Image (cartoon, rainbow, N blue to C red):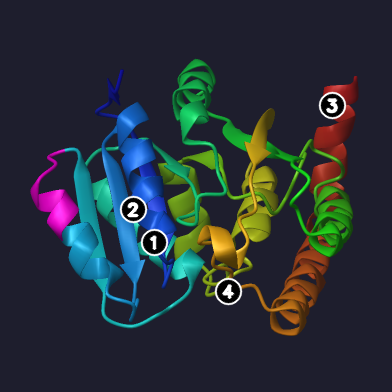
Amino acid sequence: MTAVSSTHLVLIPSYNPGAKVYETVSAARQHWAPVWVVVDGSTDGSAERLEKMARQDDGLRVIVLPQNQGKGAAVFHALEQAAAAGFSHMLTMDSDGQHPAELIADFMAESARQPSAMILGIPVFDANAPALRVQGRRISNWWANLETLWAGIGDSLFGFRVYPINALHRVMQHQRWMRRFDFDPEAAVRLCWEGVRPVNLPAAVRYYNAGEGGVSHFNYLRDNLLLIWMHFRLFLGFVFRLPVLAVKRASKSG
C-alpha cells in the first residue's frame, strides 16, 4: 500500500543512472507519494523516460537541471522548492537501486515520531559490497564523530536518510560547500552542530555489478580527495565550535 503525505516527500537525485533508476523510482512510488526525482544534467536519455513516467503518475515529479552540478546541488535545488511548497521533511535515496525502498515508510514514521531529528540509515552490507569502500568509510565516520564530539552519527556517508527541511536549508544556504559527493557527511555534521539530533536505523544496501545494471560514478582518487578537503574544513569548524560543543555534551551527560 502506498502512503501519501503532505509533509514528507522522497527525493531521488539522479545522474546518468542507467536502467536501474526506473526500478528505483517505481519501487519508491509503490511505498510513498510524493516522490521527486532531480535529473542532474544527465546525458543518457533517462530524463525523457522519467518525464514520461511522471506524466502518467500524479505522485511523481521530475525536475530536470540543464547541467550536472553534483548531488548536493541537486538536493538543494529540490530543497528550496519543497520548502516553498510547505513540506517539512525529505527522505533522500540514491537512484541506482542500492537503497531499500521497502523501508521508506518506516523511516518516515520515525521522522514523524521525532520531527526535530534527522533519521540516518546505518548500512547493512551484503556479500557484493566492495571491501575497500566498506572499510574506507570507517575513516570518514571516525572523523565525523570527532567533529561532533560523538553526537551519535552512526554512518556519515549512507545517503538513505530523512532530513528536516528547514534545518537543512538553513545550513546549506549560508555556505558554498555540500554541493557534490561531500553532501551526505557534511550535512550530518553541520546539522549536529545546529542541534539536530541523529537517530540511527539499520538499512540493507545492495551493490549491483555492471552485469546487473549497476552504475557507479564514485572515483576513488577524486572523491577521497574531496572527503579529505571536507574533513579538513569541518575540523577547523569543529575547533572553533569546540567550547560550545563541549558545554552541550557535558549538559547532556549531566
Q: Is residue 197 visible?
A: no
Between marks 1 and 4 in the image, the one whose residue lies nearer the viewer: 1
Q: Quadrant of residue 10?
A: top left
The amino acid type, in three-letter code, at marker 4 is: His
Asked whether the viewer can see residue 110, the reply is: yes
Q: Secondary structure at mark 3?
A: helix
> Which residue matches tag 1?
19
| Mark 3–mark 1 distance (CA, rounded to whole Å) | 50 Å
Residue furthest out toward the left:
55
Question: Who comes first in sequence, dot 2 or dot 3?
Answer: 2
Residue in view at x 77 percent, y 39 percent: 154
Q: Residue at x 32, y 67 (%)?
A: 39
Location of mark 2 (residue): 22
Please say if the residues under marks 4 and 2 sit with CB atoms less than 8 Å apart. no
* Highlighted range, magenta: 52-58
- The numbered mark, 4 or 3, whose residue comes first in the sequence reads 4
Q: Residue at x 80, y 46 (%)?
A: 244
Q: Disc number at residue 126?
A: none
> How crowded is the residue under tag 1: few (<14 C-alpha within 10 Å), some, or many (20+)?
some
